[in-house]
Every structure is written in structure tokens, then in C-alpha cells.
Image: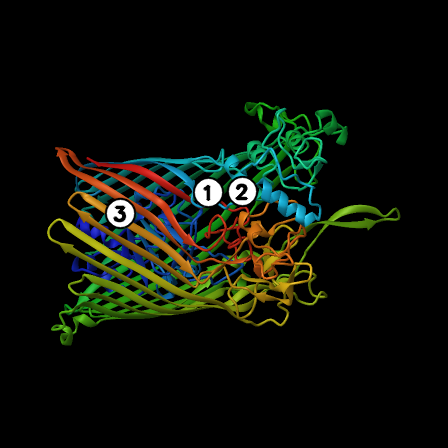
Amino acid sequence: MSCASFAQVTPQQQNDSIFNDSIFFQDQVMEEVVLIGYGARKAGAITGSVSSIRAADIVRTPAQSAIQGIQGKAAGINIVTNDEPGANPSIRIRGLGTILGARDPLYVIDGIETSSLNGLNPNDIATIDILKDASSLAIYGQKGSNGVVLITTKKGKEGEIKVSYDGYYGQKFIQRDVKMADSYRYAYFNNTALGAPTYFSFEQPYNTNWLDEITDTGQVINNSISLSGAGENASYYFGASNYQEKGILSGSEFERTNIISNNTYKLLNEKLKITSFINLSVAKNTPKPLSAFTNAYKQSPIMPVQYANGRWGAPLVNPQGFNDLTGERYNNVANPAAQVYYFNQQDKNTTLIGSVNAELKLWKDNLKFNSNFGATASWGKGYTYTPTRDLWLAGNPSSSVTDYIALNPENPIINTLQQRRSTNYRWNWDNYFTYTNTFAEDHNVTVVAGLSRTTFNISEYLNATRQDVPLQSNYWSLDLSNNNIEVAPGSVAQNTTSTPIVSVAYFARAEYDYKGKYLLSASVRREGISAFTEDKRFEVFPSVSAGWVITSEDFMKDVKVINNLKLRGGYGEVGNGNAGSLNAILFSTGTNYAFGPDQIIYPGNNVPYQVDPNLTWETMKEIDLGLDFALLDSRLTGAFDYYNRKTENVILPVAVPTVLSPEPVYLNSGTVSNKGVELTLKWSDNIGEDFSYWVGGNVSQNKNELEEVTSPFFGEYIGGSLGNGQWTKQVLEGQPLGSFYVYEVTGFNSDGGFTYSDERVVAGSYIPKTTYGINLGFSYKHFDFSVDAYGVAGNKLYNGKKAQRFGGENVEYDILDSFWVPSNPNATNPRPSNDVPRASTYFIENGDYLRINNITLGYTFNNIFEGLDKVRLYATAVNPFLFTKFSGFSPEIVGNDNANPLGGAGIELDAYPTNKTFLFGLSIGF
């Protein structure tokens, strides 16, 4: 990919750049260059739907991931953040078009294709350009089926050497708590549920707040320094950074160190330009189990953290109704504090991203050739140490080591050590020609043609487990295990090597404009992917888009109120080949066969399902219509888009007759649609010489639907497990993907329990129908102030932690204010019960929320002395306020399975609460 050069803009324009969906607001902004894939184009000549976000806006919300920092700053982009240290946010561009295959966008960092931005320091990013519509994405083929995020890193600028430092320190807190029943209310609820008024005493000696016991004040520290400059024939940028985060969950930590180098060299009288880029990231993660939050929610307050003798507290009640070592167990919930204390895991991941780009001018400035090679390599290692004996003793505080040995005298396991190693590679090599020319002064033509090869899924994973290693952590080694009995059949060592997937493509794009007034762009990409059978590998994906700059017409010259008005539209087709791994023949173990006269049992394998040889691409087809405008001396700017996107041949599991396959077969058998509108508006102005301000926002509406299932054998495709035998989601024709499908609560029976509908009903989807962002700010002399907000509407969430009951768990404080008794038949909650609750609409809640992402106040000292350009001090509140009716810890729920629509997405169970952070920062420029 060729590197884009960006027009110089004033500091005020830089501050005002956050709403560049319409990307041509002022004359200066019209001249800025936006990446469009295998090239760049002036913002005013863009015919597709592209959102551009500049450096100042990326870092305004401090976060370890740049994606988290741009939430709410681009229309049509739904970002679900995750405040667990080191976690990836989820990003969905214009809805969800597939369920089994890849759902994430393609990230391209200076021409290098990657799967995320977690290894890149946000301070090193110059721009993020997001390609949203199919006419823009088609040039990337199947890799861009879920959108493309183009990242340009910072480069040196000609002039004196520039040294910059950015750093901040902050503290993190749980944004919102869930008030649980105290000891008295717990005893009252569970006594009523048991029908035993004195089973738990109302005068308990303990009233433990378990959330307080497992959480601490978190902190975040970030330090970044960069050195940059350029001469006549070379430019350089070097940066180093260190990010440290201590999570609110006790003991959880994350640290990342980055080194980046970006250099450009001009050779052969500037005919040859060589650009080298390298980014090294070393991340260390000390996670803690998120199930501790669920256990803290469920564990009873009458239980102490530890008993007076130092043993861990356990849910045991004595005949007098008190929690005591001598009692009987009243629930199966773990001690959250012990769980966190004994969980010992560490992971280290080293990621190296690099590219070399050569650009050769073949004929003047009109014809050039680019060759770009980019690669990403990742090496991971980690361990998990489990003190098996200590965990048993923690759950059985009245027992001794002798009792534990008696359970398994031949092999009394003391501990278990698991060690992991992994490697992952991907690389891409792009070669293409670019021809540009102007004919008869008014006809501008740009043609790009080339080929691309990508090889990914080059990975290997090694996992080994041994028992009874030395207790000292510096001797935790598999070689020092004195117990070589297998942990479980086949699990002592696991070595998995994946099959690489190769993508080869030929592409071309032609762009034409007449006087910058009439714009036309067309592209075609023929691509093959090795994941499919030979006769299904190649497919052609075309696109076309056009634009009309209406304000360039003569009849608009006297219309002073309209400064810019551009109408654009496009159509494109993009394939998704990332579901091709489903085409592999899998073997299921554990099948036993009896042979011979003695019927000796031999272990065997079987093929669990047949492979459809016709399995092929999912294809996304989209129409996009847009309008960009600038009014009132460009003080009011904006953009409007309407899109209609259909993904055809969606791969779904189909339960064919058993005689053909005992397990579901994956077939191209569905059509998914995403229809929506996007609107961006911004007002910016100056009052006098010292005061400037801006107010803006964006809103997007999307309707997601599984429109059609073509196979008559498609049946129940369920998910959203709660871990208690209940499930909450099903893929249904005519509904959004991963809709909640539960029983409807219809009232109360004579005993105060719920009555339910005979059949499950659709109860909404976790996918928002509406997303929006609000941004405002001002600068007065040396002061600057800004506020960013983000919100969603029209979605539902499932309060999974509330629904996961087996008996004897705690309940929320407010439940006892209104539960069914004969004298209160219209209560909102059923009678107290220890039954496993049915998955129902009772646990479905409104997922709408509005969150203030950040509030920042800064002051800049300029030209303090020669050589010191600026010093800026600022204070930022990240996520200080949240407005929602959801009763859980957070309405932003990614799930622990990459936001799988049939997994934990939208279900609050073992979820990390949203944090609020208060920090102070310093920026220095030399």
C-alpha cells in the first residue's frame, strides 16, 4: 500500500477533525489525503463511505487499544469496550453479516495485514481510515468482508529533530456496583425459600461484601517518547513506550512495551522510495478468573473470608443457623477471595510487525510501481499453576491434609502445572502499478492494477501438563514433576499445527473525475482461497461508485449558504472466505471398537460429519447512497448515508437425515441483511480571536436480520449457555442473528412461582438498533476542554449472573422489596425459591445506555524557552458517568468468545465491570 501524505492543518482544524465522515469540510480538509486501499485519494474526491479519525482524537480517550479510544467518533461503527487489562474491544462495522466465519474487520498497518491493534501504541498512530461500504472494500476481497481499518503510523517531517513525550497516571474504580442483600435479608430470603424460618439466624456475626473483598483500586501508567525528523532524502520516526495497568480485580495486571521505527529513503534522484516499518510489542499479562465476579455476586454475606483459625471461609451452617466450620453446606459457590488468591497464571506475548515498501517511478510522476511485503509474527508462552490440594482444603475448612490424602491414597495430587507455547504467522505481498494523468486539463485518471498474495493461519500450539512440581515458583517446571501419571487421557501433551490458508488475488481499479465535479470509480478483484475445493476456490468481486460535486456547477455559484454539496453512491460485492476452515475433514476421538474372539476394546476415531464439496464463499452485496455537505461558511458540516447490505450463501449447520450424517453439516444455506442509515453533523465556529468551539454528533441505525434459510433441514441452532442447563439464544429466520429466545413470563401460579408461555418467544437481540456519539469542546487562549459520549439503543441484555442459581445463593438487595406473597400478588419478583430458574423474559433487560467516555481539561504553555515548543498539562475523567436501566455491572458485554453471537455476547455472566478512570497527563514537545 502506498503511503499517504497529509496536508498541514492548524491546531484548531486538528481539534475539529473528529467528524471527518464528510471529510471535505473546509478547502484545506478537501486537500487532505485519505487511504482507500492500494493507494490514496484527496478527501473531496472520495466516492465511497470512509470515516477518518486523526491522531488528536485517537488519544483523547486514553486506552491501551486505539480502537477503544475511537468509540463514538465514527458513524456506523459499533465498538463494545472491555476494561479487563489487556483485553480486545469488539468492533462491528455496519452490523453482523455472518455467524460462523470471521466477524472482525481487517486491520492494515502501513500495508501490513493484522487481526488487531493490541500490539500498537495509540500515540504512534497518525490516522485511522475506516472503509465501510462494499464499493470501498471490494479492492480487498474476502479479507475486507467485515470492513477494513487502515492505520497510518507517524512519520518524520522535514525540519529540525522533534522530540515528544506523552505520559499519564490514573486510578481506576468500578463504575457502578450491584447492591446485594445483607446478612439479614439473605437469611430472610433463603429461610422463606426453604420453608424453614430459623434455618439461618437473623443475627449473623458476619456481613461480608464480597465485591469489596476481591477488588482494589486499579491504576494505569503510560509513558511514550518519540524522536522524528527528515532531511532532503530521508525521514525517520522512532518511538518507545511502556503501558502498565493494574486491574480492579485483585492481582490482575497487564504491561506492554513497544518499540517502533518508521523510515523512508529516497534514492536514484528520488525515483525510488524505500519505506521500512517495524513495531515490536512485548506484553505480559497476569489475569485472574472473571468468574470471581459472578461468585462474589452469588456468595452469601453470612460467610467470612477466613475463620479465626486462618482457614478460608466456606458456605457451612451449623444447627444454630450460623456460618461455622462444623456446619453443613448450603450452596456450591466458591469462596471468591480464595479463588482469586489461588489462581496463578501468567502469559507473555511477543509480536513483531514489519514491512518493506518499494516505490519506483517508471515514467515521470505518471507511472509508478509499488511492491510491499508485510508480515506479522507472534510468539506466546504462559503457565497456569493450580494448587489442587490447597483448593480442596479451602473448600473443606474442617478437613485436614490427612483427609485429603485418604480420598486418593495412591495418587494424592498436590498441584498441577500447565505450560503453553504458541507461534502464529501471517504475511502478505502486494505488487501493483499506479498510473495517473490529466488529459485536456480537465480529465483526471488514476488506474491501479496488481496482484496480492496472503498466507495466514500459520500457527502451532503446544500445551503440556504435569502434576506435583515443587511449591517454590522458581522451580515450576515440567521436568521437576515427580508425578507422571496422566492428568487425563491424551491431555498430558497437546501439539496442534494448523493448515495454512493461502489467498491469491488479481485486482484493478480505475478512477476518473472531470474538473473535480463528476467522479467515477470502479474496481474488480478475482480471488482464490485454498480453504475451498479446487473448483470453488476462485470468485470475482466487482464494485462501482460515483460522485457529483453539485456545488461545482455554475448554477450553484450564487448559493452562498451552501459551501459544499456532494452526492455519491456505490455498489460492490465482497466475499467472505474465512469460514472455509469448516471445509476440513475432522476426526472425533473416543470411538471404541471390539475386535477378535476375545472382543478386545481398541480405541478409534470417526468422522463426525460429512463435508459438503460445494461449500463456497459467503458473498456480501451492498448498495450505498451518500450526501456530504458544508453550510454557512463551512461552520455546519455533515454526511448522510443509506445502505442496504445482503450477505448471501451464509454458512449454517444443517441437520441432514441421520443416514447421511449423524452430526450437522455446514452448508451455504442462508441470507443475512443489514439495512441502515448514518448521519454525522458538526458545528464549529470562532468567537473573537481567542475562543473557538465545536459541537457535533453522529447517529446510526441498523436492522439486522436472517432473511432466508434455504435448506429445509435447518433446525435448532442454539447457544447462549448459562452453565446451569439453560440456554438463551437461537438463530431464527426473520430475526437478528443470536436473538434471545426464551420463555415468556405470563404471571404467577398459586404458589407464587412464575407461569410461562408454552413455547419460547423472541425477546430481542443484544445487537443495538441505534448507536450514537456526541462530541463537544472549546479552546480559550491556552485552555482546552472537550467531552465525548457514546450510546446505544434498541438492544436487550440477559442478566446471566442473576439467572445462574442452584440453591442457597445470595440475591440482589431490591428483590426483597417486592416478591410474591399471598398479600402481594402483583409483585415483580416470584416467591423465594432455590430451584434452577427457567431461561425467561424475567432476566431480559433493556440494554440502552449513554456513557460519557471522557471529560478533558488541559492547559498548554507555548514557547517557554528556545527549543521547548510546548508543555501541556491535562486532567481526564474516562467513563465518569453512565446512564442506563440495566441492573448489572455493565451494559457493555463482549463475552469471553470473541463476541460470538451464539456465545456470551450480551449475557452478563463472568463479565468484567466497566471502570471509571481519573488521570493526569503531561505532553512535552521539543
Query: In the current view of this chain or complex, which residue is farthest to the right?
Result: 597
Q: Nearer the viewer, residue 825 or 541?
A: 825
Query: In the current view of this chain or complex, which residue is farthest to the front?
Result: 823
Query: In the rendering, at what x and y percent does residue 260 appear?
Result: 33, 39
Name the element at disc 1. loop
Pointer 3 residue: 56
Identify the residue at image location x=55%, y=54%.
903
Q: Amino acid at mark 1?
A: Glu
Q: Viewer-nearest of labels 1 and 3?
A: 1
Q: Is residue 35 visible?
A: yes
Q: Amino acid at mark 3?
A: Ala
Give the alpha-carbon distance from disc 2 to disc 1, as whole Å. Answer: 12 Å
Are dots 1 and 3 in contact, CB under 8 Å?
no
Give the alpha-carbon distance from disc 1 to disc 3, as whole Å. Answer: 25 Å
Q: Amino acid at mark 2?
A: Phe
Give the alpha-carbon distance from disc 3 to disc 2, as whole Å. Answer: 35 Å
Q: Earlier in the sequence, mark 1 or mark 3?
A: 3
Say left or right for 722 vs 550.
Answer: right
Res. 293 mark: 2
